Amino acid sequence: MPKTKKARLLATACCLSIGVTATIAQAQGRADKPKVVTSAPSLNFYGVPGIVDLPSGEALPDGNLAIGVSNFGGQTRTNLTFQFSPRISATFRYIGIQDWNSDGFDTYRDRSFDVRYLLFKESRFRPAVTVGLQDFAGTGIYAAEYLVATKNFKRPFRLPGKIKVTGGLGWGRLGSLGSIGSLSGGVRPVFNPNDTGGEPATDQWFRGPVSPFAGVEWQVNDRLGLKAEYSSDAYTAETSRGVFSRDSRLNFGVEYQLNNNLRVGGYWLYGSEIGLNAQFQFNPKTPAAPYTVSGPRPVIVRPSRASNPAAYDTAWASAQSAPVVIRDAVQPELRENGIRLETLSTTGTRAEARVSSISYDNHAIVVGRTARALARILPPSVETFDITLMNNGLALSTVTISRRDIETLEFQPDAANLLLSKAVISDAAPQPAANAVKVDDVHPRFSWSLGPYFRPSYFDPDEPLRYDAGIAAEARYRFAPGWLVAGEVRHRLTGTITDSTRLSNSVLPRVRTDAILYARAADTTIENLYVSKQWKPGKSTYARVTAGYLEQMFGGVSAELLWKPSGNRLALGVEANYARQRDFDQAFGFQDYSVATGHVSAYYEFGKGYYGQLDVGRYLAGDVGATVSLEREFENGWRVGGFFTLTDVSAAEFGEGSFDKGITLTVPVSWFIGRPSRQSVSTTIRPIQRDGGARLNVPGRLYGQVRDGHVSDLTGDWGRVWE
């Protein structure tokens, strides 16, 4: 090694040592600072568990979401990682590399996906072992595969804290320096920045040269961490284009845990560059604000039949006024609890209440509070409660509960599971009983809202995040059971989507890629305006018809039929649509383009919050194919998922990205505010929006309305039935 490089490395090591010593002294001098408690491993510059620029063998805690932003040598990586299951994690990454100055780019931007699988969890004598695919479906600038192991040692050599030792083998980028040969043969193609990307390069995985790499992390205390690693990445694409100079295989870092969620670090990389990394981790299972609801009113226990047999007389049920009197007593009690009574039917020994939630996003709470209210008010002779959960005129399921169980189980150990074991959840009848009395204020019902809106547009090469923001007014009128007239008007106050110059170059009908023209045409627009009717043809079937201006770009007619028994994991549906493209100003006019589109769908609940969906049919551009979706839902309403669509459109016709794919996020508002709310915020992140595989956005699709009130979701939330 030249003396100048040795001197530079020595000076760097001295500076790091001085900085580390000062940081340790400062940390020790602030013993009164609250202790950080986190079990999550630290992240590398790619946003996955790792050292500095290399991966480690650990996995994030199940369900963790991690957002990481790193920068060094003019390269910025923004990463989103989700621990989809205890062993599987996925990462989406967006990068910008400055000073590329070749291949037609000034700043090179790219998107990539990773997936990791934890082969072995760490045990007393065995390290955690992970296999990973890095950038397996992009243009391949970061394409690599690795097999890596990590072992934790607590208080080694009587040092404070713990030390993690990592070693692994890398292919692709991670096999580009210090190769020990080719274990599986094959030649990897050279990275091409003008490739459309998007297709998994299965013919490259674990092929070509393989190189060893290693690293060590010393977690000095609950806040301070030190890192060092020996890299096997030659950074050929970057150094050959003069992005930065790579003078060493060693990387060093100092990290500090600011709180349970946020960790920051500073680094010296490859003998020439200073790097920064910010890591934010959280778990949807842990709400930002504790979820609290007002306490329910106590259950009034009936006198025993032996002590007061007259109380159990059913003669009251024959009185003509009895149903109305009981309804008028039950309705305000439920409304005070955030529940809307829609109909009530009674006999001398049984009652059915059809209820919908005004504020709760948890159906178990609705069931529990409805049962309490009925137990407080109904005559003692009524022993059985049928509580039918309703949503927008659809009867989802009926929970049958014994009143005696409500009276006796509440304060028993494991009361929720005891009640669930005795309750019966069944398909709800399409209509209430003939003797049911309706509640006067259920229909007609008018509601409206006025507030801000924000519409993001991702990954424009000239500006990665564009947006429109303004005021939105929405109105909804339910004039009869199952009927809805709804609409939304938006007025844009500010935004940058209109500034984009990236007009469509699609060879397909431009069903999605003219978004800029829609944004430019008018500031005040009709987002949607439609009428819909939904109902239950049978106990296990649901139907919907919707007509009007369905979404920003299309209007038309949509019809859907869904088969979903309440206790069945499988659901099947069919949807048929006729859609016509709206004028760019999003007023009342239409363009010439129209299409018949529709899908046959299968939905499956895998259990533990995992859901799969397969849609096969015709898309807006006339292409035919299928969409596969996989989603995880947490008990508090968080949903994280991904999808991809393959159609008869070739990769060349589709354009950049090769096929449609993306990530979906749904966040319940209650997670932030700590109070019951049925509102949620949803977004879809696509690496790129093209015209192939584009599906019509229809408001109120049935499966999303129905599944929350069926057995899997209801029992998953059942722990809150007594709240």
Image: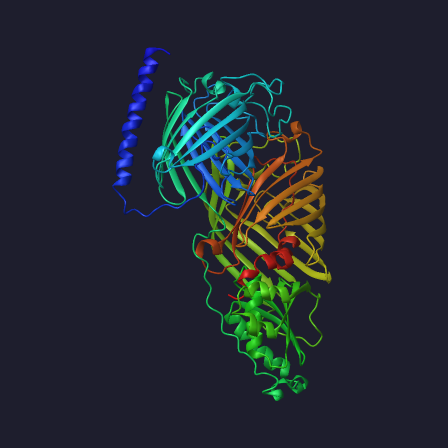
Quarter-of-image position of residue 209: top right
The residue at the far right in this view is 538
Location of residue 317 in the rendering, given as x and y in whole percent from the top left corner: 66, 83
Quarter-of-image position of residue 261: top left
Location of residue 444 in the rendering, given as x and y in whole percent from the top left corner: 60, 68
Left or right of 45: which side holds 358?
Answer: right
Tell me which residue sits at (54%, 61%) in the image: 719
**Is 646 placed above or below 711 here?**
above
Q: Nearer the viewer, residue 423 or 70?
A: 423
Q: Nearer the viewer, residue 222 or 462?
A: 222
Check the picture and name the quadrant holding the N terminus.
Answer: top left
**Is 351 placed above or below 364 here?**
below
**Is 178 placed above or below 545 here?**
above
Residue 291 visible in the displayed image: yes
**Is 57 placed above or below 353 here?**
above
Q: How many marks?
A: 0
Q: Nearer the viewer, residue 358 or 639?
A: 639
Q: Nearer the viewer, residue 652 or 301?
A: 301
Location of residue 394 in the rendering, given as x and y in whole percent from the top left corner: 66, 62
Tell me which residue sits at (61%, 64%) in the image: 420
Residue 480 visible in the displayed image: no
| Coloration mode | rainbow
The residue at the far top in this view is 2
Location of residue 262 in the rendering, given as x and y in whole percent from the top left corner: 39, 42
